[in-house]
Image (cartoon, rainbow, N blue to C red):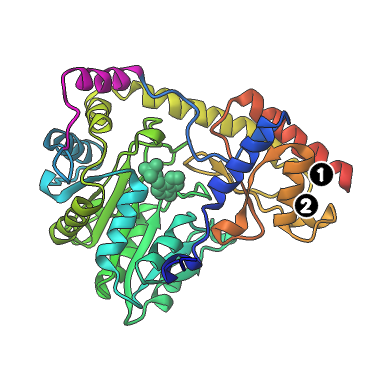
Amino acid sequence: KIELAQRVQSLTPSTTLAITAKAKELKAQGHDIIGLGAGEPDFNTPQHIIDAAVQSMNEGHTKYTAAAGLPALKEEISKKFKKDQGLNIDPADIVVTSGAKHALYTLFQVIVNEGDEVIIPSPYWVSYPEQVKLAGGVPVYVEGKEENDYKITPDQLAESITEKTKAVIINSPSNPTGMLYSEDELKALGELCLKHNVLIISDEIYEKLTYGDNKHVSIAQLSPELENQTIIINGVSKSHSMTGWRIGYAAGNKEIIKAMTNLASHSTSNPTTTSQYGTIAAYAGSDDMLQEMREAFENRLNVIYDKLIKIPGFTCIKPQGAFYLFPNVKEAAEMTGFADVDAFTKGLLEEAMVAVIPGSGFGSPNNIRLSYATSLELLEAAVDRIHRFVESKM
Ligand code: PLP
């Protein structure tokens, strides 16, 4: 028997992917499951992106590219930073990766030494802690309180910074809460990072998905000092409905980007060539499709939010972005006789046939996460099922 390396012995599989797989399995067995677990838009990738990718293959672009990505793609990403955030980012300070997840993974590998601390505001995206641990780092959780819209305050950040703090992660709009940090909030957090020389990792993957009057602001656009202190992580998975293409990127400090590129050159060589050509078309093309997708999400949110908060024992802060609802259902779990929210979630899947993700995987055991990246018809049916399930058990 071959013993596994220590670093993976406590590695847990992504909860999101695990529940989604379980729901798919039940569905394949003939059960009428509605899945609200998935973290991916339900729209097709816009046709012009697919066409550009096919054309690139027909033209023979099927070989390795530069490890950091095609120069033409980095050029388009640089233009995107200018257009959307007013940032002047040199294409040389960008590394294209196999999804934003891989950008983050590579980033932690190049900045974290054994025992270094990375501050992770909770509720958090499931992969941050595992990726930090895989790099030998120590995740330091800071609880974004429900009464503060699940966001951390400057006082909390100040208290959690130590000699060993290497970086802090800001994910706005947030998965799983859908909350956005305002410009003032980011300024206050950023000042502390500058004072203590803490690297800011700004995960902006849901940048394009904001609703109502809410607009995404990048901490990097608030001052040149903050720009220098920040590595921006982004990609096309959520914005362009391109999850399977696996294209993300990191931008910022030259040394860090160079180290990430070196590491990628020994691990992936380069992100998939065809996907990179598709992404050039995604960024060079019109944003109309993005607007349509955003509007569809917003419409779903408005319809479904009103229904969700009528479920007994559910309370929910209205999300400002991304495509998740993150209700606190502690009371509903208690009223219906479940031991905890994890058990309640299991009951929802097995009895109400609705797959949602328990908040425990995001460091928030009183909540569940529902993705509204599915049709309005299914969403309404799912929320009706949950409502009936809760009432039947009260
Ligand atoms: N960051 C957050 C907060 C996410 O929710 C996700 C995807 O679920 C990612 C990063 C990774 O996106 P991808 O690797 O598909 O680009």
Q: Residues within 10 Å of mark 2 (few under 14, many from 20)?
A: many
Q: Is residue 356 above or below residue 193?
A: above
Residue 171: image location, x then y, percent:
40, 53
Callout 2 amino acid: Ala
Q: Position of residue 277 (x, y in %)?
A: 22, 28
Q: Is residue 201 left or right of residue 122?
A: left
Q: Which mark is residue 390?
A: 1
Residue 167 at what x, y percent from top left? 32, 67
Q: Which residue is at a point 47% across and 26% down the rendered structure image? A: 295
For badge 1, the amino acid type reads: Val
Q: Secondary structure at mark 2?
A: helix
The answer to whether the residues at label 2 and label 1 have Cβ atoms under 8 Å apart is yes
Residue 299 shows which numbered tag?
none
Main structural element of the magenta stretch: helix, strand or loop? helix
Residue 202 falls in image quadrant: bottom left
Residue at the (73%, 49%) spot, across then down:
346
**Residue 12 position (above or below residue 216):** below
Neighbour tally class for label 1: few under 14, some 14-19, many 20 plus, Cα within 10 Å: many
Identify residue for label 2. Answer: 332
Magenta region includes residue 57 = yes
Residue 185 visible from this viewpoint: no
| Nearest the eye: 65 or 222 | 65
**Residue 313 appears left or right of 139:** right
Residue 82 appears in the picture as rendered: yes
User: Which residue occupies 15% across, 46% down?
Assistant: 89
**Residues in magenta?**
47-64
Q: Secondary structure at mark 1?
A: helix
Viewer-side residue, 124 vs 133: 133
Most extreme residue toward the bottom is 163
Q: Is residue 309 left or right of residue 197?
A: right
Q: Position of residue 68 (x, y in %)?
A: 17, 46
Q: Residue at x 59, y 41 (%)?
A: 21
